[in-house]
Image (cartoon, helix red, strand yellow):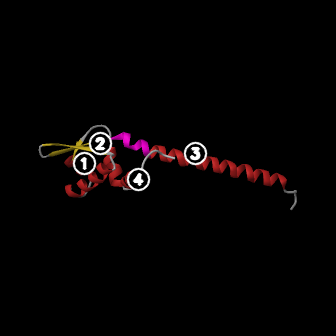
């Protein structure tokens, strides 16, 4: 299947499951931002945003660098590659299964006598 450990994939999808964390990722998509800059659009404390950042960091979706007291966050888009591989695997799997189902249904429909 996918060349990634299940626990890493679990962390990745868990991190992506929250709308706040997805919005944080979109905020840092074009350039790195500080925790304070990330907290601005949200009605939550810096500590709450920092907890979301830690989850994203653990899933390797962002990297955080510390410059003095300032923490800057940068997107690590390469981490999304494993999610993409997983989704592609299941897409191919289900497309194949649905094709087989359609062929079987068509064959069964053709083999039944009309009017019954």
Could you say whether the residue bearing mark 2 is in a helix, strand or loop? Answer: loop
Q: Which residues are magenta?
A: 74-82
Q: Which residue matches tag 1?
A: 38
Judge whether residue 75 is colored magenta. yes
Tell me which numbered mark, 3 or 1, is placed earlier along the sequence.
Answer: 1
Which residue is painted at 27% across and 53% down in the image?
A: 54
Q: Which residue matches tag 3?
A: 92
Which residue is painted at 71% across and 50% down in the image?
A: 102
Q: Which residue matches tag 4?
A: 13
Q: CA distance from mark 3 to mark 4?
A: 19 Å
Q: Image height check: is 85 above or below 52?
A: above
The disc placed on residue 26 is none
Q: CA distance from mark 4 to mark 2?
A: 18 Å
Q: CA distance from mark 1 to mark 2?
A: 8 Å
Q: Which residue matches tag 2?
A: 28
Q: CA distance from mark 1 to mark 4?
A: 21 Å
């Amino acid at each position: 299947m996918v060349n990634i450990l299940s626990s890493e994939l679990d962390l990745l999808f868990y991190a992506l499951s929250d709308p706040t964390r997805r919005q944080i990722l979109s905020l840092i998509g074009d350039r790195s931002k500080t925790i304070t800059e990330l907290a601005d659009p949200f009605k939550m404390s810096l500590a709450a945003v920092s907890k979301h950042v830690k989850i994203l960091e653990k899933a390797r979706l962002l990297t955080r660098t510390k410059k003095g007291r300032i923490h800057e966050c940068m997107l690590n888009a390469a981490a999304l590659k494993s999610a993409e591989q997983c989704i592609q695997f299941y897409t191919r799997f289900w497309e194949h299964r649905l094709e087989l189902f359609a062929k079987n249904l068509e064959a069964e429909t053709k083999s039944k006598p009309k009017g019954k």
